[in-house]
Image (cartoon, rainbow, N blue to C red):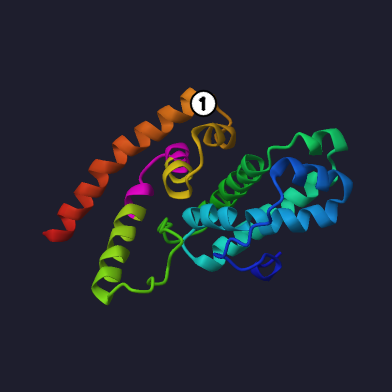
Amino acid sequence: MRATDVPSPPDDDRADEPDAALAAHLAADLDGGFAVLMRRHRGVVWSVARQFVRDPADAEDLAADAFLRAYRALRSYDAARLQTLRIRPWLLTILRNTARNAARDRSRRPAPPPSYETAADEPGTGHGVEQHAESGELQRELGAALAQLSEVQRTAVVLRHVVGLGTGEVAEVLGVAEGTAKSHISRGLARLRPLVENLREEATR
């Protein structure tokens, strides 16, 4: 499945249907409900995928693979399971597992390290070239620092502070208790700050 199989990010063309109604929609009409699911959640899935891989096209492929895996899983769920599904953390758990599998595959062949840049690749309107260059440099520093965190700390920090998920949802995606998720977030941030400072110091030498 290629990037063209998933709607292009980063627009978040969300449907108004709440998750409970969407779960019921999936139970009644899987294909129709899944189309709504993709419209509603494609933005956050692509944003998280963008933190796991270097190239935007690879992020689209990763998101597409995650949606394909999600659809296959939904086909095996009965109506009772569909109606109780917490869709966003479930989707992001699939995405994380897909990313980890892809990372294992990449580790078997030489490849450049991921940059973990934020999803905004184009300058916003109203910002000068200097501001955009400074923003891009900050993104590169943050990406280089994130790459040095453990996978679980990096994922926790990205989900909480880049994507903006609540701690409970972060815990669901990581498959841990909420207190453990808070610990991963806190420790990840504590390690991230000196890493960013060190990178800045090295850049000014």
* Residue at left offset 48%, top offset 49%: 163
* Residue at left offset 80%, top offset 45%: 74
* Residue at left offset 32%, top offset 60%: 140
> How many marks overall?
1
Asked whether 148 or 3 is in front, the reply is 3
**Residue that extends furthest to the front in the rendered view of this protein:** 16
Image quarter of the C terminus: bottom left
**Residue that extends furthest to the left in the rendered view of this protein:** 205
Looking at the magenta stretch, what is its main secondary structure? helix
Membership of 127 in magenta stretch? no
What range is drawn magenta here?
144-156
Image quarter of the N terminus: bottom right
**Residue that extends furthest to the bottom in the rendered view of this protein:** 129
Residue 8 visible to an observer of this rendering? yes
Residue 92: where, in percent of width, then height? 60, 45
- Using the rendered view, name the quadrant where residue 190 is placed: top left
SS of the residue at dot 1?
Answer: helix
Side of 70 where 198 appears, left or right: left
Image: 190 above or below 111? above
> Disc 1 residue type?
Glu
* Residue at left offset 19%, top offset 54%: 200
- Using the rendered view, name the quadrant where residue 97 is placed: top right
Residue 182: where, in percent of width, then height? 43, 29
Residue 167: where, in percent of width, then height? 49, 33
Membership of 150 in magenta stretch? yes
Badge 1: how crowded within 10 Å, few (<14), some, or many (20+)?
some
Side of 100 where 5 appears, left or right: right
Residue 78 visible to an observer of this rendering? no
Side of 165 where 27 appears, left or right: right
Residue 50: where, in percent of width, then height? 50, 58
Q: Which residue carries the number 1 mark?
A: 178
